Amino acid sequence: MDKKLHKYGYSKEQWLAAKAEMRQILTERAKLRGMIPYSELVGQLTTVRMAPNDFALAAMLGEISAEEDKAGRGMLSVIVVHKLGDMQPGHGFFELAKSLGRDTSDILACWVAELKKVHAYWSKR
């Protein structure tokens, strides 16, 4: 049996399981038109352990958002925010948004527009 690690020290199976669990946590929160701090998100994960500032978390959120956007549901990680301070997504969210064709010249406007899109989709589910 191949025990080769996939990404960030996780096996492919662990990565996919954690990503599915994270997507579920995010969609449940989006259905309520809510947001979730990075620290609360990683605290709810049971399949793997991550810290709020892990590169693995950023990568996983990026994958989820890119996949959700491709499916027409918007960038789901828009609801993951800093617990203190600006209470917005981190810099990586806006980098991904720009790469997906969003106008990030005004990050607040970008964030609010994406948040409305995601909340509108999921609150009807």
Image (cartoon, rainbow, N blue to C red):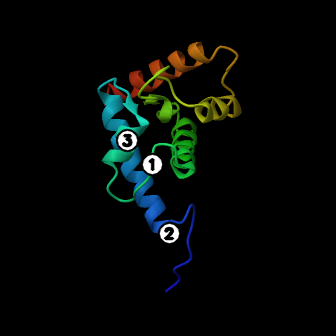
Quadrant of residue 23 within the rendered picture? top left
- Cα–Cα gap, marks 3 and 1: 10 Å
Quadrant of residue 30 within the rendered picture? top left
SS category of the residue bearing label 1: loop
Q: Residue 73, can we see it? A: no
Question: In the rendered structure, which amino acid carries the disc numbered 2?
Answer: Ser
Q: Position of residue 82 (x, y in %)?
A: 46, 29
Residue at 37 percent of width and 41 percent of height? 41
Q: Which dot, 2 or 1, sits closer to the camera?
A: 1
Height in image: 12 above or below 26? below
Residue at 52 percent of width and 28 percent of height? 89
| Residue that mark 3 sits on | 41
Q: Quadrant of the C terminus?
A: top left
Going by the picture, which residue comes out furthest to the bottom? 1
- Cα–Cα gap, marks 2 and 3: 21 Å
Identify which residue, 40 or 77, lies in the foreground: 40
**Label 1 environment density (alpha carbons within 10 Å; few <14, some 14–19, many ≥20):** few
SS category of the residue bearing label 2: loop
Residue 11's label in the rendered image is: 2
Question: In the rendered structure, which amino acid carries the disc numbered 1?
Answer: Ala
Q: Which dot, 3 or 1, sits closer to the camera?
A: 1
Q: Position of residue 104 (x, y in %)?
A: 67, 20
Q: Position of residue 98 (x, y in %)?
A: 69, 29
**Precedes in sequence: disc 2 or disc 3:** 2
